[in-house]
Every structure is written in structure tokens, then in C-alpha cells.
Image: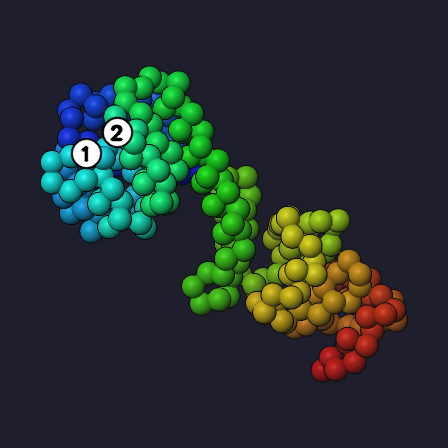
């Protein structure tokens, strides 16, 4: 997973330096902007996307809460403030964590772990998003997402709660059962030919009594109860 671009917004110079010093200790945090006012941060955000914002609350001009209200597109917001009485209000603004000043490294480390966990969940939630144009899916491999073109998938193979997506080049394992795949409108070109297999129609070369041969010469078992689904095969 790539580092998360972060901004720090605090009108106290020593607090800004302290937060930056802590953030530098964690490779997953990449500080791309440090600001002493919400107004300066908003100017930066007009042309830049960030994943994490560390915000003070009480500042000259707009408050950190006002900044957050105008920047809800930032996935992770962490308030760092001495005004603990404002914590409840901040959590109405999709706040991941609230750190009370003064604080030390172990408390900041807890926040970083929460950021990691949140981003991991967020990535898993986007596991099966369609790409622009609707001709691809994203598959999570480790901490990364791999783009796979739908027209390159030869067949799907069920493996308990997982499904294997098979292309000429590679096999991809996804935590989703075969039935869920086939209910997705993006997979309308696939036909189920066995309890554990579904093939993409255009790759079928030959239909036998007990198996199907694909154009790449791979044989797939044909279940007796699924033969009717192939009667309309051209």
C-alpha cells in the first residue's frame, strides 16, 4: 500500500512541529502540507488530494471543525486539540480519532494503527469496484489492487468461500463465492456449467457430454444439471 498523503493544520508552531516529528516516524504517513490556518489549508486542498488530515480545533479565523465541514472528501480526519469538550461534535464529521493535547508518541502510534485499519477496511470495501468504462474489476492482492479486464477472464472456479478468476496469464483468488459473482450484472457473459465452474461464453470452443473445451484448449467439467444452460449456445 502506498503512503497516505497527509496535511497538518495547527496555529501553534510547536504543536505543528511535534505532530510532524511524530508523523515522520511512520513510513505510511507522507506529510505534503503544514499550515497555520484553515484558510491556507483550504487553498491547498483546491488543487491537491490528501488521505489524512491532522487538525487543531481552535485557530485564528476558521476553526478545524469548519475546515472539516468544507473538506469531507478527505477519508481520514484526526483532531488534535486541548479542547476535549469538542470531541463529541467532531465525531459527527466522520472523525476517525481525537487526540487530547498534550500527548506523546505512544498515543500517536495508536492513531496510526487506527488509520492503517481503516484504510485496510476501505480498500477491501472497494475490492470489487468497476473501473471507468465498466470493462474491468479491481482485485485485492496483499495491500495492492490489480486491475483485471473482464474480457480476459476465461472462467471462474469456486473454492469454498473463494472464487478463482482465471486468465491466460494468471489466477486471482477473491473472497467472494461464485454465486455472488454471477449475480453481478458485470458477469452476464458468464454461464454456469458446473457447481464449481462458470465460463465466459465467447471462449467456448466445443461442448462435449461431460466437459467443455475452451479456445485455449483448457477443459472444464460440465455438470449434468447445467447442460440446459448451454442449449442456446450458438
Badge count: 2
For residue 48, side relative to residue 176 (left or right): left
* Pointer 1 local density, CA inside 10 Å: few below 14, some 14–19, many at least 20: some
Q: Is residue 85 above or below residue 51?
A: above
Picture quadrant of residue 183: bottom right
For image coordinates 46% across by 60% down, the residue present is 131
Q: Secondary structure at mark 1?
A: loop
Q: Is residue 54 above or below residue 231?
A: above
For residue 153, side relative to residue 83 (left or right): right
Q: Position of residue 50 (x, y in %)?
A: 30, 43
For image coordinates 80% across by 61% down, the residue present is 195
Picture quadrant of residue 83: top left
Given contact means CB atoms under 8 Å apart, are the residues at marks 2 and 1 in contact? yes
For residue 92, side relative to residue 202 (left or right): left
Q: Which residue is identified by label 1? A: 58
Q: Is residue 121 above or below residue 233?
A: above
Q: Position of residue 33 (x, y in %)?
A: 21, 36
For image coordinates 33% across by 45% down, the residue present is 93
Is any atom of residue 83 visible in this view? yes
Amino acid at each position: 500500500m502506498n503512503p497516505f498523503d497527509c496535511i497538518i493544520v495547527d496555529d501553534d508552531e510547536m504543536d505543528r512541529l511535534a505532530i510532524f516529528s511524530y508523523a515522520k516516524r511512520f513510513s505510511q504517513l507522507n506529510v505534503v502540507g503544514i499550515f497555520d490556518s484553515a484558510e491556507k489549508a483550504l487553498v491547498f486542498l483546491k488543487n491537491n488530494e490528501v488521505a489524512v488530515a491532522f487538525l487543531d480545533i481552535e485557530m485564528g479565523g476558521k476553526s478545524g471543525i469548519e475546515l472539516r465541514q468544507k473538506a469531507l472528501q478527505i477519508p481520514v480526519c484526526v483532531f488534535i486539540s486541548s479542547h476535549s469538550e469538542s470531541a463529541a461534535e467532531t465525531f459527527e464529521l466522520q472523525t476517525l480519532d481525537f487526540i487530547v493535547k498534550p500527548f506523546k508518541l505512544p498515543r500517536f502510534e495508536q492513531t496510526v494503527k487506527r488509520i492503517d485499519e481503516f484504510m485496510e477496511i476501505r480498500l477491501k470495501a472497494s475490492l470489487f469496484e468497476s473501473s471507468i468504462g465498466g470493462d474491468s474489476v479491481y482485485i485485492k492482492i496483499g495491500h495492492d489492487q490489480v486491475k483485471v479486464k473482464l474480457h480476459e477472464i476465461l472462467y471462474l472456479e469456486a473454492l469454498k468461500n473463494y472464487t478463482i478468476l482465471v486468465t491466460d496469464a494468471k489466477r486471482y483468488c477473491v473472497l467472494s463465492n461464485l454465486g455472488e459473482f454471477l449475480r453481478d450484472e458485470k458477469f452476464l457473459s458468464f454461464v454456469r456449467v458446473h457447481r464449481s465452474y462458470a465460463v465466459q461464453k465467447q471462449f467456448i470452443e466445443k461442448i462435449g457430454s461431460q466437459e467443455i473445451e475452451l479456445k485455449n484448449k483448457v477443459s472444464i467439467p460440465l455438470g449434468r444439471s447445467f447442460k440446459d444452460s448451454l442449449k442456446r449456445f450458438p
